[in-house]
Image (cartoon, grey):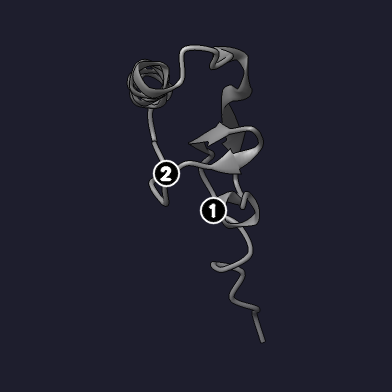
Amino acid sequence: MEEDNSLNSIVDPVYVVTRDGRRVEPTNYVKKSEAVERSKSLIKMVKEFDKSFCPNIVSIKKTTSPHYIR
């Protein structure tokens, strides 16, 4: 009997945008370029409200288990 590991991992890696190590949204991006654009728009938006914001805390994680990133 074969186990269904669909909840444990995704076959193809996806990209997840994080802020300070936490997911910013439930969206998983298939293309890195989409994740980069989302991270740029997030940085721009947060800077409007917090001038002292450090953009280095926004990152893109490549993973086959996006549900483990909280």
Residue at screen point 57% across, 57% down: 67
Between residue 35 and residue 50, name the one nearer to us: 50
> Where is residue 64 drawn, in percent x and y?
60, 46
Residue at screen point 41% across, 16% down: 47
Q: Secondary structure at mark 1?
A: loop
Residue at screen point 61% across, 52% down: 70
Q: What amino acid type is highlighted by mark number 2?
A: Asn
Please tell me whether residue 6 is drawn above or below residue 50 in the rendered image: below
Q: Nearer the viewer, mark 2 or mark 1?
A: 2
Residue 62's image quarter? top right
Q: CA distance from mark 2 to mark 1?
A: 11 Å
Neighbours of disc 2 within 10 Å: few (<14), some (14-19), many (20+):
some
Residue at screen point 38% across, 46% down: 27
Q: Which residue is mark 1?
A: 10
Q: Secondary structure at mark 2?
A: loop
Q: In the drawing, what numbered circle is on residue 56?
A: none
Residue 60's image quarter? top right
Q: In the drawing, what numbered circle is on residue 28?
A: 2
